[in-house]
Image (cartoon, rainbow, N blue to C red):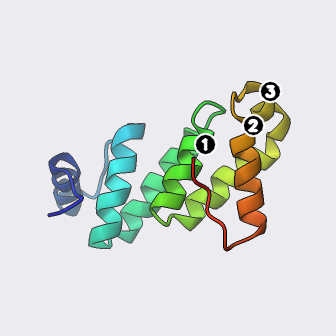
Amino acid sequence: MKHIDANSFETLINYCYTGSLSLDERAARKLVVAAKILQFNEVVRYCSRFIVNKLSYANLLDVISFADDHGCKDLRAKAFGFAMEHFKEVGDKSTSIYNINKCITASLQPKLTCVF
């Protein structure tokens, strides 16, 4: 199947039999893509929560970009909320405050997208 890697497909099959998932951040992102295609909505929500729990200043922009690229509105909203809650810290730690400003502008004007 196009856009679904073998490991993600195997993980989804195992999930069907066991009802459990074992994730790391990279696997969670790949699994979101596969689960969205195959409409495993509970897996998408679970992986999104996993990614949100791993949010940091270092991966914030990547998570927002990933969420935008894959239509994960809830994930994007949580990541954006993290950015707003920790705006000063994110700005101090980020080497690309310009990209954060682009995301904020994009959120205020829904017709724009956040592309890095």
**Place of residue 90 in the rendered image (x, y in percent of width and height, measured from the top left):** 75, 34
Nearest to the observer: residue 19 or residue 109: 109
Amino acid type, residue under disc 1 in the picture: Leu
Residue appearing at x 57%, y 46% in the figure: 116
Q: Is residue 81 visible?
A: no
- The quadrant of the picture occupied by the N terminus is bottom left
Q: Mark 1 sits on what residue?
A: 61
Where's residue 23, x and y in %? 35, 41
Q: CA distance from mark 2 to mark 3?
A: 8 Å
Answer with left or right where residue 108 lies relative to residue 41.
right
Whole-percent x, y for residue 47 in the image? 43, 53
How far apart are labels 1 and 2 at the CA level?
A: 10 Å
The label nearer to you, 1 versus 2, is: 2
Q: Decide: few, some or many residues near mark 1? Use Cα within 10 Å; few <14, some 14-19, many ≥20.
A: many
For mark 2, what is the residue? 97
Q: Circle 3 sits in a helix, a strand or a loop, which is it?
A: helix
Q: Secondary structure at mark 2?
A: helix
Task: Indicate whether 5 appears above or below 110.
Answer: above
The relative height of residue 91 versus residue 29 in the rendered view (above or below) is above
- Identify the residue position indicated by label 3 in the image: 92
Dot 2 surroundings within 10 Å: few (below 14), some, or many (20 or more)?
Answer: some
- Name the residue at 34% across, 59% down: 33
Compared across the picture, whether 113 is left or right of 39 comes to right
Numbered badge on residue 14 = none
Q: Tell me which label, 1 or 2, sits earlier in the chain.
A: 1
**Residue type indicated by callout 2:** Ile
